[in-house]
Each structure stands twice: as structure tokens, then as C-alpha cells.
Image (cartoon, rainbow, N blue to C red):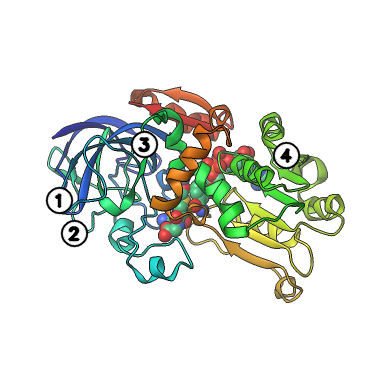
Amino acid sequence: MKTRAAVAWEANKPLTIETIDLEGPKAGEVLVEIMATGVCHTDAYTLSGLDSEGKFPAILGHEGAGIVREVGAGVTSVKPGDHVIPLYTPECRNCKTCLSQRSNLCTAIRGTQGQGLMPDSTSRFSCSSETVFHYMGTSTFSNFTVLPEIAVAKVREDAPFDKICYIGCGVTTGIGAVIHTAKVWPGANVVVFGLGGIGLNVIQGARMVGADKIIGVDLNPSKVAMAKKFGMTHFVNPDEVGRDKVVQAIVDLTGGGADFSFECIGNVHTMRQALECCHRGWGESIIIGVAPSGTEISTRPFQLVTGRVWRGSAFGGARGRTDVPKIVDWYMEGKINIDDLITHTMPLDEINTAFDLMHEGKSIRSVVVY
Ligand code: NAD
Ligand code: AHE
Ligand code: ZN
């Protein structure tokens, strides 16, 4: 079939809207009509050329919601008409990792996904006979996309696509990192580096679990009002306190250091600060931000010897097919706020504006509605 998609032909070039060819679903796969997709900083990261797995030409996008239109042979868990959220972290429930119940990082299709291909090592997308690669197994910047059955979460049908698409990455990543990865306890002091589409969901998650102080760190003071609305109690602007004094400012604010910190920027310098502002003996720092390939984190080993813990979180530690429908329910029950974080909505033709707004620090989340 033909479908409209925003194609990334090469790094650092605007996406162009094309009519492309899409092959139908093979065994174990489903065809999904994407109704809406968010634009996450990770899409911009890959478009920047700094992602070691970035392949071009590709159809980016990993924060979508849509409707199953066709299923391939053997598909049993969804049917045409079902509403779904694509999962860049699938849940096969059969691999060593899924069976371990210790991690959400399902390995069933991770190898081909990182190569921009479907599990049979081919692409379903092409444009004028040229292969176009998939991205994160989802490619939600295409109106229609093909996904493995294990990479869709079936969700309730009364939930609005233009809001729940954000659960496909940012909402789940931020709230999940608090509840699944860090297991933040009531009364904990929490620090959030980066008050963007992810960090604000960490703040919302921290407030949900009853954190005490929730300290935000960002260079952009225009993020403060929204962060306060979601639960931030204190703000640290590195340009005001001095970039080399951020750790001390947080240690002072928390009476010794944070119980938990979350790095939601993707910068190895702030990752170090996030670790070092944690409380001696037990403070845990969770890396969420994706740093450019080739960069490395560093700290004095003494920081770890004295009890600080460095951890990471992908997709908030959430098991997609199990946890995503529950987060949709939380939204529909008014337990979490998504609407206020979606600051911009646009048609596919204007998708490059979403990247511009992100780089200019003017948006939290932009959502493309097909
Ligand atoms: P965003 O652009 O919306 O927000 C980033 C924020 O960081 C902005 O508010 C910006 O002002 C702030 N910032 C930038 N440099 C800073 C600095 N040096 N000091 C303080 N603040 C600074 O991005 P986002 O969509 O929230 O994504 C954040 C990061 O999380 C990205 O690296 C993204 O790739 C990553 N991410 C990871 C996962 C995961 O599963 N681990 C999921 C989604 C996104
Ligand atoms: N290809 C990148 C990896 C980027 C990365 O870490 N991605 C996160 C999700 S970001 C969503 O916005 C993730 O899920 N990681 C686990 C995994 O298996 O990729 C690079 O830098 O090489
Ligand atoms: Zn993302």
C-alpha cells in the first residue's frame, strides 16, 4: 500500500513528506494506522547523527498511538479495530529477560530493531524502490506502519490518540523511572535534571508517590512554571548558582544530598552532577538521558565506595504490554496529567516545526496528528 510519511534522508536535514510504499504485515506482524505521534528528544538525537544505531534514510518516531488495520498470519493478541500504542521496548513474555521478571529489556527482536529492520531482517518501507529503514521498531512518523505483534500494547478505545501517544515514550519513561526503576519512597528528596518532556513526568511521578522535596535543575527558566504545576518544590538554575556549584546547592537544599536523582538531559557532565548530589550512603542516581555515542561518564570511584548508586532506566522499566494499558487507565481516571504537557499540536506537514520548537526550548511535547 501507499502511505504518507516524514522521511529522514540524512542526518541534520529537515524531514520531507513523501508518499512511500509499505508492504503488508508478515506472520506475527500487524499493520497499524498511526493516528497521532509525539516528537521526543531521542528522535532529534538520532536525526543529529550522533546515534550509533542511526540509519538513513529512515522513518523516525517512537511515541505513537493508532488502530490495528490488518494482522499477519498467527497473530492472536490483537485484531483489526483494536486501539494500540506501539512499543519500542516490546514484551515477548518468552525471552530470558522477560521470563526473568528482572528487567523490561526484552531481547526477542532487539538485534534487528537496532539495524532498522523487521525481525526477518527486511524493511517494509521503500520510496521509489529505495529501501527506507524502520526506527526503534516503530516508525510512527508514518501514517501506516508495520510492527511485530509483541511490540503493540492494546489500550482502551475511549482514550484520545492525540494525548495517549505520549504514553508511548515520555510519560511512561518519566513516571516509570520513579516507580519501577528507583522505587522512590514517600518522603524522599528527589532531584530532576532537565525539565523537558521526560523530566516533568519524573516530577509528576515523584509527586504521585509522595516525595518531599522535588528539586528541578534546568538552564531554561521558562520551564519553571510548568514544573511547579507538576510538583517541583525548588528550582536550581546552574547559570545562577554557578555551573560548578550545582552539587553543593542541592546538598544544601536537601540537608546532605538527594535520596534520588534523575538525569533527563543526556549530558555526561550533568550525569556526574546527578550522581554526586546524591546522599552519601544510599542516594541513587538514575540515568534516563541518552548521551551521544562515544561519550563516557566519569566520577571518582569514592562516590560509589561511599554508597551512592548509579543506575539507568529505559522506557521507565515498564513492561509495555502489561503496564502501558494501566497508564492509559490512570490518564483516563484523572490520576495523571498529560494534556498540559502537550504544548503544541500540528499536522504531519509541519513536523519540522516540532523539532525547531524543541531546540528553541519553546515546547514540552509537540504532537503530530494525522
Ligand atoms: P527535552 O528537550 O524536552 O528536555 C531537555 C531539557 O534539558 C530542556 O528543558 C533543557 O533546557 C534542559 N537542559 C539541556 N541542557 C541542560 C544542562 N546542561 N543543564 C540543565 N538543563 C539542561 O528532552 P526530553 O524529550 O525530555 O528528553 C530528555 C532526554 O531523555 C533525552 O536525552 C532523550 O533522548 C532521553 N530519553 C530517554 C529515554 C529512556 O528510555 N531512557 C526515553 C525518552 C527520552
Ligand atoms: N541507539 C541509541 C540508544 C538510545 C537509547 O538508549 N534508547 C532508549 C530509549 S530512548 C526513547 O526516547 C532505550 O530504550 N534504550 C534501550 C535499548 O535497548 O535501546 C544509542 O545511543 O546507541
Ligand atoms: Zn522517546
Q: Amino acid at mark 1?
A: Lys
Q: Are marks 2 and 3 in contact (CB under 8 Å)?
A: no
Assess whether mark 3 and mark 4 are in contact (beta carbons under 8 angstroms): no
Instruction: Give the class, few, some or many, for how many residues have Cα within 10 Å of label 4's Cα (few <14, many ≥20).
Output: many
Task: First in sequence, mark 4 or 2: give its number.
Answer: 2
Reading the chain from its start, which is encountered first: label 2 or label 1?
1
* Badge 2 amino acid: Asp
Give the mark nearer the N terminus: 4 vs 3.
Answer: 3
For mark 1, what is the residue?
A: 26
218 left or right, relative to 89: right
The residue that appears at 44% across and 26% down in the rendered structure is 353
* Mark 4 or mark 1, earlier in chain: 1
Instruction: Using the rendered view, name the quadrant where residue 145 is placed.
Output: top left
Using the image, tell me which numbered label, if any, was put on residue 142: none
Residue on which disc 4 sits? 232
Amino acid type for the residue under numbered disc 3: Ala
Q: How far apart in space, not on screen, are marks 2 and 3 (Cα)? A: 24 Å
CB at disc 4 and ligand 1 closer than 8 Å = no
Foreground pick, 245 / 105: 105
Decide: is 92 above or below 63.
below
Under tag 1, what secondary structure?
loop
**Pointer 3: what residue?**
65
User: Of discs 2 and 1, which sits in the foreground?
Assistant: 1
